[in-house]
């Protein structure tokens, strides 16, 4: 085949190449090791000696010319394929996005977690007791004896003669002290039940019990811990105040007030002008309760407290009706997004 006809075929065929696959077949036919242009190179052995030089030059020129055209075509196909790919993978950025709404924790769950965090930081463990209790754990061993008027402090849902829905988390104290000897430092969060229902009471609510038993535990330890607690939960300026009270399972017993975090103690509608808000009950574990759990009350003493979680949530978030915390009204709950 002569050079001119190869050149003509080359141009004509290259013009028909449309994609990378055709291009590589074309390359093999003309420019590859066994291709036609290499074939022209090999012809050199049949060329008379004096013409070899001119022939070689001419073939080289054809080769350079062919490579040039090939490179242009390659570039053109590359661009074409890239454009096709862009078209194929095109994203319509004007399409409306799929909207997924993130949920949030229930305010009671967040408050409970916050409370656990504060006390866990002081080294408290967590214990959870059963919601169905017996008379012994819920009352008798907590020194709330049968026929004692203090039983009426809590309106109990009785299930049988002996079984009841626990009226407080304090039976957790008995269960912990039965299972473990001092030093004890434990939190008992959980649901409790009382036959009571109005704006600030609900038949089911939650408490967080705290119990510390060791040598030399005093009321000062209780106040110190609770001071830390109210500072962490309400504000750095928050203070506590202990008022004498009565619980059969603590002696002495106290009601604990926190300085009003709304008015800072000056007196406002939240604290009813007193500057203080009652937040929990507590005291020094009654020796009788320690003895009921076989803990030597001449060696050990304990402190205990019980916090109403809903009450803390209502105070902290300014919720005026306890029912709101149980209605699961999504519009209400959405307000507590962090
Ligand atoms: N159990 C008491 C109540 O429910 C609160 C409390 C707990 C008081 C621990 C003293 C000690 O009212």
Image: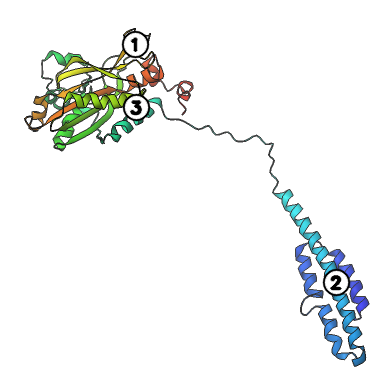
Q: Who's the residue at 84% across and 83% down the image?
A: 41
- Disc 2 target residue: 66
Q: Tag count in the figure? A: 3
Q: Is residue 57 rendered to the left or right of residue 294?
A: right
Residue 176 visible to an observer of this rendering = yes
Q: Quadrant of residue 169?
A: top left
Q: Who's the residue at 13% across and 30% down the image?
A: 216
Q: Which mark is residue 232?
A: 3
Mark 1 near mark 3, Cβ–Cβ under 8 Å? Answer: no
The alpha-carbon separation of the residues under discs 2 and 3 comes to: 81 Å
Residue 170 visible to an observer of this rendering = no
In the structure shown, which secondary structural element does the residue marked by tag 3 occupy? helix
- Badge 1 or badge 2: first in the primary sequence: 2
Q: Residues within 10 Å of mark 2 (few under 14, many from 20)?
A: some
Q: Is residue 332 rendered to the left or right of residue 310?
A: right
In the structure shown, which secondary structural element does the residue marked by tag 1 occupy? loop
């Amino acid at each position: 085949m002569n050079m001119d006809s190869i050149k003509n075929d080359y141009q004509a065929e290259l013009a028909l190449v449309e994609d990378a696959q055709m291009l590589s077949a074309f390359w093999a036919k003309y420019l590859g090791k066994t291709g036609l242009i290499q074939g022209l190179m090999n012809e050199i052995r049949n060329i008379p000696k004096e013409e070899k030089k001119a022939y070689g030059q001419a073939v080289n020129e054809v080769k350079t010319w062919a490579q040039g055209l090939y490179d242009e075509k390659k570039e053109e196909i590359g661009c074409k394929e890239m454009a096709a790919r862009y078209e194929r993978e095109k994203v319509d950025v004007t399409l409306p996005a799929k909207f997924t709404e993130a949920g949030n924790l229930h305010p009671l769950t967040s408050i409970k977690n916050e409370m656990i965090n504060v006390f866990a930081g002081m080294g408290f463990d967590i214990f959870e007791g059963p919601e169905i209790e017996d008379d012994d754990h819920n009352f008798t061993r907590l020194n709330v004896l049968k026929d004692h008027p203090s039983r009426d402090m809590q309106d109990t849902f009785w299930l049988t003669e002996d079984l009841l829905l626990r009226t407080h988390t304090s039976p957790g104290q008995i269960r912990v002290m039965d299972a473990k000897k001092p030093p004890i430092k434990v939190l008992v969060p959980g649901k409790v039940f009382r036959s009571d229902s109005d704006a600030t009471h609900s038949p089911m609510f939650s408490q967080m019990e705290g119990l510390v038993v060791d040598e030399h535990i005093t009321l000062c330890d209780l106040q110190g811990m609770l001071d830390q607690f109210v500072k962490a939960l309400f504000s750095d300026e928050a203070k506590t105040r202990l008022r004498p009270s009565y619980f059969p399972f603590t002696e002495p017993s106290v009601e604990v007030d926190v300085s009003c975090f709304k008015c800072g103690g000056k007196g406002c509608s939240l604290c009813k002008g007193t500057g203080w808000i009652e937040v929990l009950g507590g005291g020094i574990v009654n020796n009788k309760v320690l003895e009921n759990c076989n803990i030597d009350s001449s060696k050990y003493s304990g402190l205990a407290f019980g916090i109403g979680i809903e009450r803390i949530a209502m105070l902290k978030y300014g919720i005026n009706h306890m029912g709101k915390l149980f209605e699961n009204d999504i519009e209400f709950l959405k307000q507590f997004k962090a």
